[in-house]
Image (cartoon, rainbow, N blue to C red):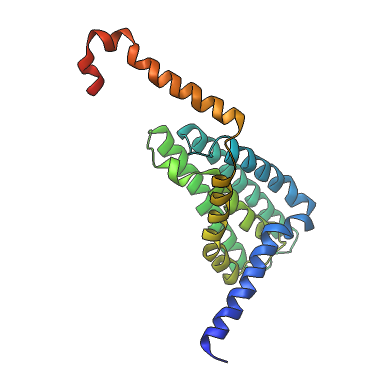
Amino acid sequence: MTWYITALLYLWKIFKEWLSTMFVLPFTNTDMLWLLVPIWISWFFAEFFQEKIGTSMGNALTNSVVILWGSIDSTRQTIRLIGEGVLNGIWDAVLRFAVITVIFLYGALIVVLGIRGNPIIKKIARVREITYLFVMFVPIFYNALPFSFDHIVAAVIFFPLFYFIIELVNKLMPNPKALQEDLEKSSGNSNNSLLEPSSIENPGMRFR
């Protein structure tokens, strides 16, 4: 068997695992749904009603709360599995806590950057990325899926596919009425600001 056939078979294998993680595994564990369902619902409304044309710093900071809470819940689940004797391997537990630590630090970094007013959080803390992160890794922390290198590879490789599909849906869907009204109000306020007395008294201030 040639190498490219082997590579294609491997990609097909991890693609099926990726699809199962996204759409099948969440329904195999009711406890897991208590965390994932609110994340999915929050993603839907935030994606298409708040972040359809971009993410504000306020939204990004709100999204960081989901990261922090999800990492805390993942820690709780990992400790429970260790206490019940489900996780016997030391390295399995270490790797799980390592991933949880990275996720928690990601959320904490967003909070710190947001408090400092750094606009980069509008690019690294969209609800889309956060939802994907937890949908891919929560099944591992709830022991619905083994912690494997293949799973991490699948999560990384197929993230652009997930991102592109959501972006395409965003482009094809018309703006919701609520979002359209917010945009019109924002545009109106921007136009009215040109007529403020301070701008009339000193026109040069507009260009500073």
Q: Total of numbered circles in the picture?
A: 0
- Foreground pick, 63 / 40: 40
Q: Please give the name of the residue rendered at 56% of the width and 38% of the height, measured from the top-left corner.
A: 65
Q: Please give the name of the residue rendered at 67% of the width and 45% of the height, measured from the top-left corner.
A: 40
Q: Please give the name of the residue rendered at 62% of the width and 58% of the height, measured from the top-left corner.
A: 136
Residue 161 in the image, given as x and y percentages of width and height: 55, 60
Quadrant occupied by the C terminus: top left
- Foreground pick, 160 / 181: 181
- Left or right of residue 28, residue 60 in this image: left
Above/below status of 22 relative to 68: below
Residue 96 in the image, given as x and y percentages of width and height: 59, 60
- Left or right of residue 198, residue 66 in this image: right
Quadrant occupied by the N terminus: bottom right
Q: Please give the name of the residue rendered at 57% of the width and 36% of the height, measured from the top-left corner.
A: 175
- Foreground pick, 47 / 195: 195
- Foreground pick, 4 / 157: 4
Residue at the outermost left position = 204
Residue 170 in the image, given as x and y percentages of width and height: 56, 45
Asked where in the image residue 47 lies, by quadrant, the reply is: top right
Asked where in the image residue 204 lies, by quadrant, the reply is: top left
Asked where in the image residue 176 lies, by quadrant, the reply is: top right
Residue 187 in the image, given as x and y percentages of width and height: 44, 24
